């Protein structure tokens, strides 16, 4: 069920995920389109998330936006200092800006980074994690990971987990998506594109997420005039994801756009995305066990030990398990 409407206010609105912004010139959403999008969100009882460009919007746009409850997603490069101060989520696209920023302990931040920069500068994150309410890392080229990269990432997660462990023992509760999210979850919490959220682009058309708009403007799923028209909507649901529905890497972003880009299926992640998610899962498990050495901590959460990093490798076991479940269900219903 839809819960969120993401409104891209301009073609140059900041990216907050894996995709890059292809547009170089400003193309502001017409004011009437904005107002119609707000009406759509109100009628559908959706929480609206506005994604801002780097320049200051006209006053009449700001007035329309403030007419409804919403969240602001803003780039750290935005010229509007007042808007940056109001941002619910601040997006950093490079490490230098993050290192120089005046961070607010009550706010959430996103750092979009290439793997090479992450591998070189990850120790800097210790300081950031301690200063903010939440930090999300988005690795923009996760699909290029190699076996060597997997090993590096595993080591980085271990080092950062030691820092977070000390923080929890000291009575703090840092939120760092690639390590703390899994130990807080009891079910999948993925990006939700096409299921819990949909995007309205500046052209007045709906898209599964902003990435689909930037990749191909014709790849829309409806418009404000005629409503949503998602073909085969079940394919975006977890129940129709043959690998993901068995998986317990609950923190995995399971990016729909990245899935299609790498496997040609919206519900099937790439090997690289799966391995990265399972390295995070295992690091969270280890961190949770280490925190518990200092006292009782989240006893309701159990992260089992596993012997694989890609669920595809154990698909035969899950097929057998699914068959057994179906046989049990059949007998319960017929005998």
Image (tube, rainbow, N blue to C red):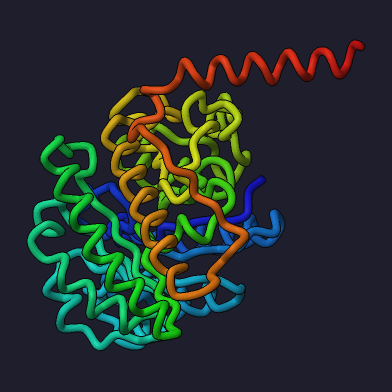
Q: In this view, does 93 lie above or below 305?
A: below
Residue 204 location, x and y as percent?
A: 48, 49
Residue lying at 16% horizontally and 44% vertically, measured from the top left: 151
As drawn, is 274 to the left or to the right of 125?
A: right
Residue 98 placement: quadrant: bottom left
Residue 235 location, x and y as percent?
A: 54, 27
Q: Answer whether residue 205 is visible to the viewer in this image.
A: no
Q: Which of 228 and 87 is in front in this view?
A: 87
As drawn, is 84 to the left or to the right of 251?
A: left
Residue lying at 50% horizontally and 71% vertically, measured from the top left: 71
Q: Nearer the viewer, residue 75 or 202?
A: 75
Residue 221 location, x and y as percent?
A: 51, 35
Q: In this view, does 191 lie above or below 319?
A: below
As drawn, is 236 to the left or to the right of 117?
A: right
Q: Is residue 60 above or below residue 136?
A: below
Rendered-image quadrant of the N terminus: top right
């Amino acid at each position: 069920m839809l819960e969120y409407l993401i409104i891209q206010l301009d073609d140059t609105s900041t990216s907050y995920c894996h995709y890059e912004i292809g547009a170089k010139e400003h193309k502001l959403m017409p004011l009437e389109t904005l107002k119609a999008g707000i009406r759509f969100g109100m009628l559908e009882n959706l929480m609206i998330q506005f994604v801002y460009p780097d320049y200051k919007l006209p006053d009449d746009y700001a007035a329309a936006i403030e007419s409804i409850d919403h969240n602001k997603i803003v780039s750290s490069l935005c010229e509007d200092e007042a808007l940056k101060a109001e941002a619910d989520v601040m997006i950093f696209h490079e490490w230098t800006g993050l290192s120089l920023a005046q961070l607010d302990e009550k706010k959430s931040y996103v750092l979009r980074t290439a793997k090479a920069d992450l591998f070189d500068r990850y120790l800097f994150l210790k300081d950031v994690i301690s200063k903010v309410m939440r930090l999300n890392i988005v690795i923009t080229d996760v699909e290029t990971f190699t076996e060597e990269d997997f090993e590096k990432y595993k080591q980085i997660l271990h080092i950062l987990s030691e820092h977070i462990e000390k923080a929890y023992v000291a009575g703090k509760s840092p939120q760092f998506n690639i390590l703390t999210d899994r130990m807080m979850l009891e079910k999948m919490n993925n990006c939700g594109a096409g299921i819990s959220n949909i995007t309205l682009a500046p052209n007045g058309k709906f898209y599964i997420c902003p990435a689909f708009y930037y990749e191909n403007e014709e790849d829309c799923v409806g418009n404000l005039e005629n409503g949503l028209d998602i073909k085969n909507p079940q394919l975006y649901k977890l129940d129709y994801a043959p690998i993901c529905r068995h998986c317990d890497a609950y923190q995995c972003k399971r990016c729909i756009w990245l899935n299609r880009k790498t496997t040609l299926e919206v519900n099937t992640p790439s090997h690289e995305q799966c391995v990265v998610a399972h390295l995070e899962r295992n690091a969270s498990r280890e961190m949770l066990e280490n925190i518990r050495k200092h006292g009782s901590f989240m006893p309701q959460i159990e992260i089992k030990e596993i012997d694989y990093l890609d669920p595809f490798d154990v698909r035969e076991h899950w097929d057998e398990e699914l068959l057994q479940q179906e046989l049990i269900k059949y007998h319960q219903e017929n005998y």
